[in-house]
Image: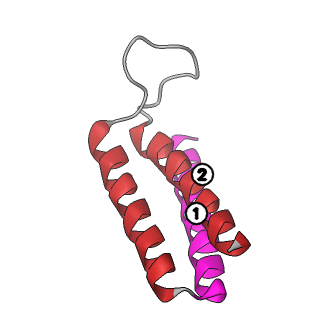
């Protein structure tokens, strides 16, 4: 149960980072009046997160939960790295 909850939290963190990376328009990090996240990428990431959590609960395997959580973090890292390398 611990690894399932931990993997869900990992996926939530990775989804937040991916939504921020996909919504980033090259602006500096400062307060803005508009909503910082784009609606479509955030909605798609939320649907993917729900599907991953449902799959983890349906499978019920600890190793699958660990794999899914780690995979989500790796995707967020690669997406962030791609954006950083593209900008610089």
In the rendering, at what x and y percent does residue 21 appear? 49, 44
Q: Return the residue at label 1.
A: 8
The residue shown at (37%, 69%) is 51
Q: Which residue is mark 2?
A: 13
The stretch in magenta equals 61-88
Residue lying at 59% horizontally and 88% vertically, measured from the top left: 61
Residue 48 horizontal side relative to residue 72, left or right: left
Disc on res. 73: none
Asked if residue 75 lies left or right of residue 19, the reply is right
Q: Is residue 64 magenta?
A: yes
Q: Main secondary structure of the magenta part?
A: helix
Whether the magenta-drawn stretch holds residue 15 is answered as: no
In depth, the one of 80 and 38 nearer the eye is 38
Residue 29, quarter of the rendered image: top right
Q: Nearer the viewer, residue 27 or 17?
A: 17
Query: Tag 2: Cα neighbours inside 10 Å, few (<14), some, or many (≥20)?
Result: some
The picture places residue 39, in percent across and down from the top left corner, at 29, 38
From the image, which quarter does the C terminus lie in? top right
Q: Tell me if residue 45 comes above or below residue 75 in the rendering.
A: above
């Amino acid at each position: 149960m611990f690894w399932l909850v931990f993997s869900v939290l990992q996926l939530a963190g990775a989804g937040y980072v991916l939504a921020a990376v996909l919504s980033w328009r090259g602006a500096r990090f400062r307060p803005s009046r508009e909503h910082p996240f784009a609606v479509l990428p955030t909605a798609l990431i939320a649907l993917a997160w729900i599907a991953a959590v449902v799959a983890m609960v349906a499978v019920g395997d600890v190793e699958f939960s660990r794999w899914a959580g780690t995979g989500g973090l790796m995707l967020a890292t690669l997406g962030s790295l791609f954006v950083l390398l593209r900008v610089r």
